Amino acid sequence: MTKDTKLAVLIDGDNIPSKYIKEMMEEITKYGTPTIKRIYGDWTNPRVSKWKEVLLETAITPVQQYSYTSGKNATDSAMIIDAMDILYSDKVDGFCLVSSDSDFTKLATRLREAGMQVYGIGEKKTPNPFIVACDKFIYLEILHSEEDKGDKGKTQKRQVDKITPAVLRLLKNSVADAADEDGWAFMGDVGKLILKKQPNFDSRNFGFEKLTPLFSSLSKQFEIDARTQAGGKFKVIYVRNK
């Protein structure tokens, strides 16, 4: 996706903390231009009052959904209906669904079936069915700065995931699958393949801003080769299993 790609950003206001909004919108611009930005919730409920403070700063349109019987279900229905209306309007090239709720799994699947690129954003508690239904899923926790103020004002370190044997197998298998006859794989192809296998994979989950430093940190398992392209202006990164 390029920055000219038009995205519809639909946010489940009942399910996502407002503290993530600025970093979240900055993250979304990496994948396209958010031309439609809507957030759904019962704005008469004091529980979502914190959102009101940031909506004007980010130009997100609040959509009122009264809690008739279940506010959560009402919000989900409104988001799904709007998403389908937007899909058939042909105004966007992709969607960004912001929620930690598995109820949007079917919506993500349907949008991808229609040829849309679907990005999911939610907290680490998000159920796996919704995660794997997206092309890419981004955890909100990694979008915060390395050190954040906790609820009591104390500075807290961002929690970093460990590289488990399962993660290592994913990396090694992806390198092998993308490799040429000599075992070398273009890092860009490896990254795309990893996301197809595991949409919530992100080097930032492990404390690395990019994929190459993550592989470089595993020097016992991988070999890195920075090759100069024709003209000598840029280097292309290749990786090989040891």
Image (cartoon, grey):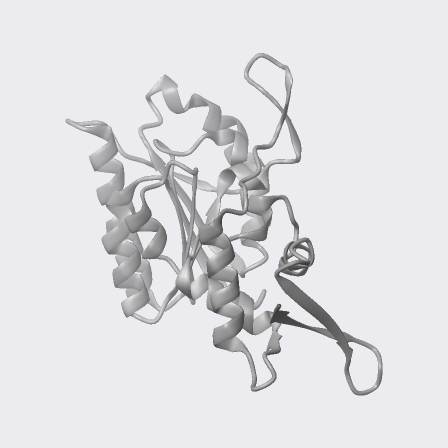
Identified at 54% across, 59% down, the residue is: 33
Extreme-left residue of the structure = 69
Identified at 54% across, 60% down, the residue is: 31
Q: Residue 88 appears in which quarter of the rendering?
A: bottom left
Work out whether 159 lies above or below 93: above
Q: Quadrant of the C terminus?
A: bottom right
Q: Is residue 63 left or right of residue 218?
A: left
Q: Is residue 61 left or right of residue 105?
A: right
Work out whether 105 lies above or below 235: above
State the residue in front, 145 or 14: 145
Q: Quick check: can you spot residue 92?
A: no
Q: Is residue 106 left or right of residue 30?
A: left
Q: Residue 39 appears in which quarter of the rendering?
A: top left
Identified at 18% across, 28% down, the residue is: 70
Q: Quick check: can you spot residue 47?
A: yes
State the residue in front, 118 or 68: 118
The x and y percentages for residue 208 are: 65, 49
Identified at 26% across, 50% down, the residue is: 80
The x and y percentages for residue 180 are: 56, 84
Extreme-top residue of the structure = 152
The x and y percentages for residue 93 are: 43, 67
Work out whether 180 lies above or below 209: below
Q: Residue 98 appears in which quarter of the rendering?
A: top left
Work out whether 234 lies above or below 93: below
State the residue in front, 132 or 54: 132
Q: Is residue 47 left or right of residue 81?
A: right
State the residue in front, 185 or 58: 185
Looking at the rendered structure, the number of numbered marks drawn on it comes to 0
The x and y percentages for residue 192 are: 51, 68
